[in-house]
Amino acid sequence: MSYYFTILSPSDAPLFNIAFGTSKSGGDGIARFRFPDSAQYMNQFVIHSSLDIVEEAQWMNGNMYLKHIDTYPPAAAYISAFLTPSGTRFLLLHQPPQPPSTSSTGGSSLLSSSFSGASSSRASSSSVAANPTSPQTEEAVRQFMNEVYENYVKTIMSPFYRQGMEIRSPVFRTKVTAAGRKWL
């Protein structure tokens, strides 16, 4: 699976973003999106197109983790969201690997991936990859978001950080990458 994670301020200004791939079960950690030439811009477009849905969901749900909130079918991308009490949004775009052969009826069932959520069995890892909205995937994404949130709070509590400033800390980037390796 390929992931694009971004943190947006309450005024929709990007504060942080990173792209990475699956590291579990033999993955190399490199993001492989379906549109490699325009992945950076396409990912930003897909993330920002889901903001209206995030804003609707935040008032209907009292939880910080909103789970899977949107899907972008042309890229087979799924967006999960996490809200902070200050209104900052964490958005994770996850895109399962492309099936080896496409079928008009069940291409997603042909997916085989090295992604595994909380389970370590080989059979469950392929079912998680086949269904990015499965409970195992949702739990792995929730754990990732919670760990990133803890590190985000530590970062913004720094006396050198100003509200709304882009996060450029290499330590924070390393911690987000480590959380991705750990949970995704």
Image (cartoon, rainbow, N blue to C red):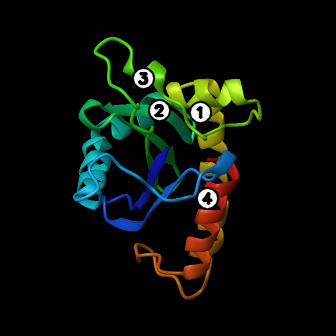
Disc 1: which residue: 138
Q: State yes or no: discs 1 and 2 in contact (Cβ < 8 Å).
A: yes
Q: CA distance from mark 2 to mark 4?
A: 17 Å
Q: CA distance from mark 4 to mark 1?
A: 15 Å
Q: Position of residue 70 (x, y in %)?
A: 36, 32
Tell which tag, 3 or 1, sits nearer the viewer.
3
- Against 25, is 137 above or below? above
Residue lying at 50% horizontally and 48% vertically, measured from the top left: 83
Q: State yes or no: discs 3 and 1 in contact (Cβ < 8 Å).
A: no
Disc 4: which residue: 148
107, 7: nearer the viewer: 107
Q: State yes or no: discs 3 and 2 in contact (Cβ < 8 Å).
A: no
Tell which tag, 4 or 3, sits nearer the viewer.
3
Note whether residue 90 is visible: no
Q: Which mark is residue 164?
A: none
Q: CA distance from mark 3 to mark 2?
A: 17 Å
- Against 172, is 51 above or below? above
